[in-house]
Amino acid sequence: MGDVLAGFHAVWEFESDSVLIRYERGIRTPKLLQALGERRVPLSAVEGVTLTPGKRGTVVLRLVPRPGADPLMEAADGQLKEGSDPYRLVLSAEREALAEYYADELKPLLTEAGSGPADRFLVPVPEAPLQFKAYDGKASFDGTSVQFRWSWTGASSAKWKAGDQSFSVADLSGVEWRSPEVFEGHLRLVRRDGSGPSAQPDQDPAAVVFGLGYGPVHESLPFAAAVLAAVRTRGPVPVVPAPSRRDPADIAERIRHLGELHQAGLVTDEEFSSKKAELLAEL
């Protein structure tokens, strides 16, 4: 088609086999859309298009993604607020006829592209490396493994006892994301061996929890989607490189916090000695 349709917060460029969506930057644009920047959505990833009345004199043109085609929507699992839906294009009501024209032009192309659940992800996700700060630690993803590094101010004693975590993508079967915009949001990694989740996220070393200002949607959801996409397309188990040497000041702070847990009776003498030795070995 080769046409361009501009709406509020986004511009759609119609191509023969895809729709290129560019999201605007600005204080009125939802942060998730700003973080995504642009997305090329293949028509093979779309099963329908709708045009409905919007709020305050607007209409909404929306692509309906096929189940299983977009890792971002799979990770979101229906938890996104309407304004953050990356498949919506909001236009003024005066442009309804134009929006209807494009909807009618798309429908036969979608019929040709296919329908029903997709057998693989078709929409790309942000590339690694990715990271974000949760309430109880820092999560990072390098494309082959996920690392959780606990915060001494927010992590539970259970997570401190377990130590910082590293999970190979090959050892994971999925990702559980709960929006930070609802009560007790978190990101939990689902392991292939079936272990967990036997504990609440704040006690589970395979999960990080969110809080006010920690793990926001525009950071944690693309992260979850990228990990999920890697899990679904995983290859051989990657070789995890040896960790780099830690900052001595950071190690000292961790040992100090471990001592506080020990004095409070939350860590046994044996656990204290063992964990202290592990931390010193990282110097």
Image (spheres, rainbow, N blue to C red):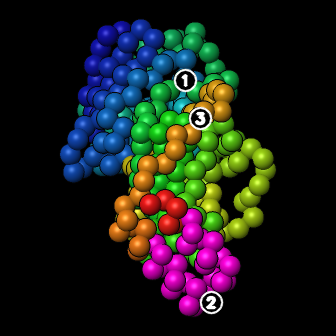
Q: Residue at x 49, y 48 (%)?
A: 243
**Residue 84, position in %: x, y?**
40, 46
- Name the image quarter holding residue 7: top left
- At horizontal 32% and vertical 10% (from top left) the residue drawn is 2
33 sits left or right of 149 in the view: left
Q: Is residue 259 magenta?
A: yes
Magenta extent: 254-278
SS for tag 1? Answer: loop
- C-alpha distance separating marks 1 and 2: 51 Å
**In the figure, is residue 35 to the left or right of 82?**
left
Which numbered marker is on residue 239? Answer: 3
- Indicate which disc residue 237 carries: none
* Res 188 quadrant in image: bottom right
Q: Which residue is mark 2?
A: 265
Q: Which residue is mark 1?
A: 122
The first of marks 1 and 2 along the sequence is 1
Rendered position, 262 above or below 277: below
**Residue at 75% over, 64% down:** 198
Task: Tell which circle, 2 or 3, labels the residue nearer the N-terminal end.
Answer: 3
Q: Nearer the viewer, mark 1 or mark 2?
A: 2
Q: Position of residue 238 (x, y in %)?
A: 60, 33
Crowding around mark 2 (Cα neighbors within 10 Å: few <14, some 14 to 19, many 20+) is few
